[in-house]
Image (tube, rainbow, N blue to C red):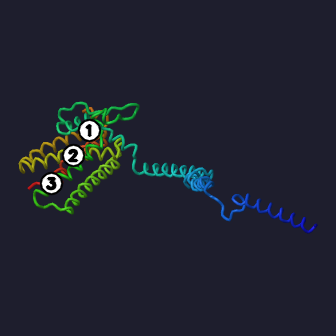
Amino acid sequence: MDYSAAQSGFRQQHNMRLRNSSVDGPDGGQLFDDTSAAGPANQGVYRNQQAGPQAAGPPGQSFLSDPMSNLAMVYGSSLATQGREMVDKNLDRFIPISKLKYYFAVDTVYVGKKLGILVFPYMHKNWEVSYQQDTPVAPRFDVNAPDLYIPTMAFITYILVAGLALGTQNRFSPELLGVQASSALVWLIMEVLAVLLSLYLVTVNTDLTTIDLVAFSGYKYVGMIIGIIAGLLFGRLAYYLSMLWFCGAIFVFMIRTLRLKLLSEAAAEGKLVRGTRNQLRMYLTMSIAAAQPVFMYWLTYHLIR
């Protein structure tokens, strides 16, 4: 009796376990998990993991956001600024950049008027340089002010015209053109140095600077260019006639320009002033003016045949 009851109870428990297993089987008792429902969520997590480094930004951006890197950039920029200022100061000591800007402050009107004075100096009356608060005005406001634009362009054009002349005579070569350019530059430097030495020996108190002397010495290349072109187009006679005119023009131009710089005020106005020092200044002015035609002929005669 008890045995049958215990057996029936065991069967009931066994059936209940089977029912529970059949009910729980699809959910909790599966051998493999169903990932179809969780797929989009997992894909979203994977995408977020991939997008994480990109959302954090590039390495440079994170580097710039670092306070130490910002401090290093500020320190580096300050060092660069100090280095640039040091270079500008040392460069201005040997090459006065600020002064060179003054000599290139020209315009088209100034260039046209200046070339007219170099060709026809006999028609020009007022040769005094204008000043504003003890400072000479820019060349574009005063045609009597010296400049470096015309001498520089004239020197370059002279080299090109010399190469053209050598080419028409079948004598052109890069080496010969280099010799022509270097010789013209050397003669210009020697001329300026000779004038500076003469001013020192005569002890002339003048406001002429080295750049002024370079500018005045470079104006003769305008006449040299026209003389060479005239000789190439019309022959040797045209060369001599044009050179004769421009040699006289540059002589008058230099006399009337330098007398206001080298002579005393009374002598510059044409009054007779006695004195050894004033005579030396006059001889120096005449010598500088007379040297211009000599250099003009020396640097051009071999280009015309």
Q: Earlier in the sequence, mark 2 or mark 3?
A: 3
Q: Earlier in the sequence, mark 2 or mark 1?
A: 2
| 236 on left or right of 24 | left
Q: Could one spot residue 52 in this view of the protein? A: no
The amino acid type of the residue labelled 1 equals Thr
Name the side, left or right, on which 33 lies relative to 245. Answer: right
* Crowd class of label 1 (few under 14; some 14 to 19; many from 20; radius 10 Å): many
Label 2 Cα crowd, 10 Å radius (few <14 / some 14-19 / many 20+): many
Find residue 298 and report its image quarter: bottom left
Q: Which residue is drawn at 21% across and 63% down?
A: 175
Residue shown at the point (68%, 65%) measured from the top left: 31
* Quadrant (top left, top right, bottom left, bottom right) of the N terminus: bottom right
Label 3: which secondary element:
helix
SS at circle 1? helix
Q: What residue does disc 2 label?
A: 220
- State the separation of the CA atoms marked 2 and 3: 19 Å
Residue 272 or residue 84, whichever sits in front: 84
Q: Position of residue 50 (x, y in %)?
A: 57, 56
* Mark 2 vs 1: CB contact within 8 A: no
Query: Observer-nearest residue: 195 or 17?
Result: 17
Question: Which residue is disc 1 drawn over?
Answer: 257
156 is higher (above) or lower (below) than 256: below
- Work out how far the residue at label 2 is from the one at label 1, CA to CA, in angstroms: 14 Å
Residue 17 position, x and y percent, is 79, 62
